[in-house]
Amino acid sequence: MESRSILASRIISVNDEAITYATEVKISLINSPSEYTEELLNQLLKSYFLVPKYLRPNDILQITVKNYVPEATYCVSNSKLNLLFFKVNDIRIGKDKAKDGSFVVYGKTSLIQEKNIHSYLPCKCICDILNEEKTSFCSWPPILMDQLLQIQSCIMPFLQNETKIDVKPVFLVEGPTGCGKSRLVKLASETLGLNMFEANLIDIQALTAAQTEAKLRIILYEAEQCLPCILLLHNIQVLGINAEGHKDQRVIASFSEALKKLYRKNLNFPLIIFAISSESEMAIDTESTFVDKIIMESLTQNERIEILSWLAEMNGLKCEADLQKISKMCSDFVLADLEALVSHATKSRLKLVDSTQNQDADLILTTEDFVNACEYMQSTFADQIGAPKVPKVHWGDIGGLAELKREIMRRIEMPLLNISGMNRSGLLLYGPPGTGKTLLAKAVATECQLHFLSVKGPELLNMYVGQSEKNVRQVFERARAASPSIIFFDELDSLAPNRGRSGDSGGVMDRVVSQLLAEMDGLESEGRVFVIGATNRPDLVDPALLRPGRFDKMLYVGVYSDAASQISVLEALTKHFNLKRGGEELKELVENLPRNLTGADLYSVCSNAWLRAVRKLMEKDVKRRDTVSADDVIVELDDFLEVVGELVPSVSEEELRRYEKLRDELSSRG
């Protein structure tokens, strides 16, 4: 039998005459970053002690401002005002000190507020027990608890008063936006009983270095008034960058000197600085400025599964979804994204809940709820930043090309699985026009749930100096912002021709190629961005782009020259057609097709055959012209054969031989 300890409690009613009230109480406000006025403090204490409170000497009171003076939280000047802490210095009953404590109530007790003090705050628990079944509420995902312990381990040595360490407690936390950097530092401050003072370095950037230096000094001074304190500096990457985007050595030197001056003081309580950044490149010297750097790594698939499960539990939801599948769909999500995903999935489920359903029943999230939420988030994010969306082209929409499909998926899926030693490399699809190179890239993006950004080479070229290179940079920036993603460069030969042969006097094409090379080389350290190129003339592409780490895998996409591949394509193109013989006519059709047809040619055959069937139907029954629907259209073999009789292949036999010769030459190289 399961043993369970139960804490029994009794409520004893006593007469008011039996309660001893303190005559006088002296308290001090503990310094904090909160903004307040004397009038607010008086009103807060009055409201708090309207109901008797039992106090003892050295108690620390935690007063939530909105519970006692709710109107104060709506003031702009009090935006930081949430909690205030007071320390009980002395309690007197008559002229005697109350050693064991006493009740304090407004109207019977004189409340004297002495000067403010510095003091540690009550430590907060990360996990609280909610009921006797030991259901807990954790304010940080248990699977990521090591991150919190790492932050705490940085702070702990500087909290030992008896130990003096001649080291500046300045740390850097680096990670993508939304991964929980500031929340982690805040939790560490709460669990260790420290104030937290926040400052955004974007807000202190001024037109002149002198103004920026002055604002920095003010921030350090204000943090010093809140000891013991953690100073959290947001966006440290902008420090030392002036309005023109150049490095400002004066501001960097001033910041370094201000830190040295601060820690030369004999502070009675610790002031620990955490700087957070979403970028790895900074103007300041990280080695000499920071004692340690904590890097928030990308979430693994197992971590995403655990966090989704934890979020559902913390929100009182039951989850019956396939979290393995969902975690693959959100492969680049950070903590904030996963929280939003659960929120949107909950909204999706609530829309489907019948109003007559039992309101007390647990809300159950399904795989469909998460899929809808994920698609909504990806679409919304893409719209906000002007980024690409995940296309909806599946392998079933593309006939044939089985070997190509396997090779492309192998190249994309391995890096997504984070397999050690598997680096990303670009793919170059080449072959005659109309063979489905763009469609292949879209299908890969759909199957792997990647955003798809299609760019035609000539679109990036611009007549103004430097604008073409800027356009290339912006393409990669948009792809990084929407990662995991695929950049598809169509007509690559027009964007990156052989350098030195383009014939432009300004060397524009050479600079564009150099910029493209630099961006592709920089993808190794960035998010999961894959690059696929397509061209009809790979021999015109600059050779530097075809070296390892860039477009080092070339795949030939040819015509459909055999009956099996042609039938496969025709079946994919006609899967929504009403065929008179249920598809049997396609086998006869293939016997009458040339052997040098591209995917575009076969698409033309199917679309024109369907249009011919529509015309026949409307000529046959003129009265039904306005009511005819797509379901009424029946395509026959004769419709296909008539179209084939007028068909001229887009790639001639001579052109096909030239492409195949080029394929053989390139494959022999390597």
Image (cartoon, rainbow, N blue to C red):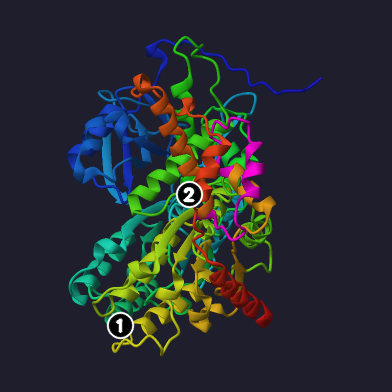
- Residue 237 image point, x, y percent: 37, 69
Nearest the eye: 278 or 10 = 278
Q: Is residue 396 left or right of residue 31?
A: right
Residue 268 makes an appearance in the image: no
Magenta segment? 572-600
Q: Amino acid at mark 1?
A: Gln
Q: Residue at x 62, y 60 (%)?
A: 408
Q: Is residue 299 left or right of residue 246?
A: right
Where residue 84 sits, quadrant-wise, is top left
**Residue at label 1?**
249
Give the Cα distance between marks 1 and 2: 64 Å
- Residue 48 image point, x, y percent: 31, 29
Vertical comparison of 95 with 435: above or below = above
- Residue 17 image point, x, y percent: 38, 12
- Residue 461 image point, x, y percent: 32, 73
Residue 326 makes an appearance in the image: yes
Nearest the eye: 388 or 141 = 388
Vertical comparison of 449 with 16: above or below = below
**Residue at label 2?**
604
Q: Is residue 596 magenta?
A: yes
Which numbered disc flags the more N-terminal residue, 1 or 2?
1
Instruction: Tell us which disc is closer to us: 1 or 2.
Output: 2
Local crowd size for mark 2, using a 10 Å CA cut-off: few (<14), some (14–19), many (≥20): some
Badge 2 element: helix
